[in-house]
Image (cartoon, rainbow, N blue to C red):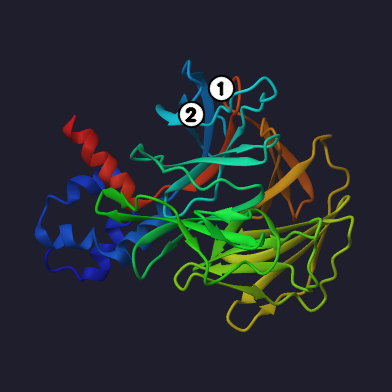
Amino acid sequence: MAELPIEIVTNVLSRLPLKALFKCKCVCKTWCNLLSDSLFVKLWETKWRKLRFFYVEDLACSRDGNRCTLQFTSADEEGRSIVQEFTKEGKYYMPRGKHYTDRGLNMVLAPCNGLLCIYRRYFLLGMIGPFHLCNPITHQFEILPECSPQTWGHAIGFGHVPSTGEYKVVRIFTAEFVHGDDIDGDFGCEIFSIKREGNYYSSSDSWRVINRSKCPYPIRNSAVFVNGRLHWVVNTDCPFPPHHDNAIIFFDLASETFGYVPNPPDYQHEQESSIYVLDLAGTLSLLDFDENLIRLWMLDDYDKGVWTGAHYIMLDPLPLEDDISFKFMVGRELLMAPWHCKYRLYYNIDTRTFRRVEKPEPAGSHGWTFGYYWESYEDLMENHKVLALC
């Protein structure tokens, strides 16, 4: 084998499952170094990486109402087979008083390098938090410090800065005072940073308020992380809407500054329609949904702001009565889900057909939702190492 060209060895090893690769690391130093090379990792993941769906649900809560046992369930792409389950003790807010009946709902942000950000949204109270970070493969779990209070309105984002190795949770909010600093009732920005060092995570002790760069427009919902930036849809339903023509706002995680993405040339938002910003296989996309008609644009050249022409998709009829939200593309299928996430709906844009996937058992009792992640080579290898020592 030592006489074989490294290209052939790489090609052969990339076809092996993880368990076999773990043993191959012990063959020789050359193979060990090869199996840790970033180019090999990318090659292996193109052949073996799997999409997993991740469910979070409440199991039990403490008497003081501030601690909760969370159950995490990973299922395969079809949602029919449970891959793994584990529980962690999380935290949530239980405001006192007879009028406070809102226990909140768990929300899962889009994954970043296999790491998930989970937070709780209190719809009746207009509050969010606390935040948790979870690695579903290694089961690492962190509870972040409490963020600052806010009056109303919030948008959340989670992403990674390759140059520093930092992961950042970003929160946009509306408030008059934060940490004693007057922000004139505008849209404040608060950041929490966490850094991965090997197989461990280190973080700052508190959230940072960014005063030098304010969010120019009201925004909504969770962000999409593409090209080192978090992207949100401008909130046109805000009670004090600004004068603007932009549909997408971005926040650059490295420079911690705001900007906007130019609209597609043929884009014109109708007041009755719903707008979504999506990550379609690494491409920033804008989706406009009006009744049963979808208009979809993709940003082919991010740096030059070049969009494709609109793709028109007719959803006629939608086989559900629930309000739905659009998540992302899986191959040629557009994934949708109702707010309660009891099932997922796939729409094939080629065959124009639907298929429905139910939530896997066991069914949760309260406060559960789902997200997704792609299995990463690094985390799978580390988890396999831990299992081998057990």
- Camera-side residue: 372 or 14? 372
What residue sits 63% from the left and 75% below the top? 300
Work out whether residue 380 can be spotted.
Answer: yes
Label number found at residue 82: 2
Q: Residue at x 67, y 23 (%)?
A: 101
**Would you place residue 11 above or below residue 373 in this image?**
below
Dot 2 crowding, Cα within 10 Å, few <14, some 14–19, many 20+:
some
- Residue 172 visible at all: no
The percent coordinates of residue 79 (x first, y second) are 57, 33
User: SS at mark 2?
Assistant: strand
Which mark is drawn over residue 19? none
| x, y percent for residue 289 | 82, 55
Residue 204 point in image, percent of width and height: 34, 53
User: Would you name the residue on which mark 1 appears?
Assistant: 361
Tell me the CA gap for discs 2 and 1. Answer: 8 Å
Q: Is residue 262 above or below residue 168?
A: below
Amino acid type, label 1: Glu
| Residue at 23% over, 63% down | 9
Question: Left or right: where does residue 245 sit relative to residue 15?
Answer: right
Dot 1: within a 10 Å radius of its alpha carbon, few (fewer than 14), some, or many (20 or more) residues?
few
Asked whether, in this view, residue 150 is left or right of residue 338, the answer is left
Three-letter amino acid code at the position of disc 2: Ile
Q: Residue furthest top?
A: 63
Element under label 1? loop
Pointer 2 with pointer 1, Cβ within 8 A: yes
User: Quadrant of the rendered structure where residue 245 is?
Assistant: bottom right
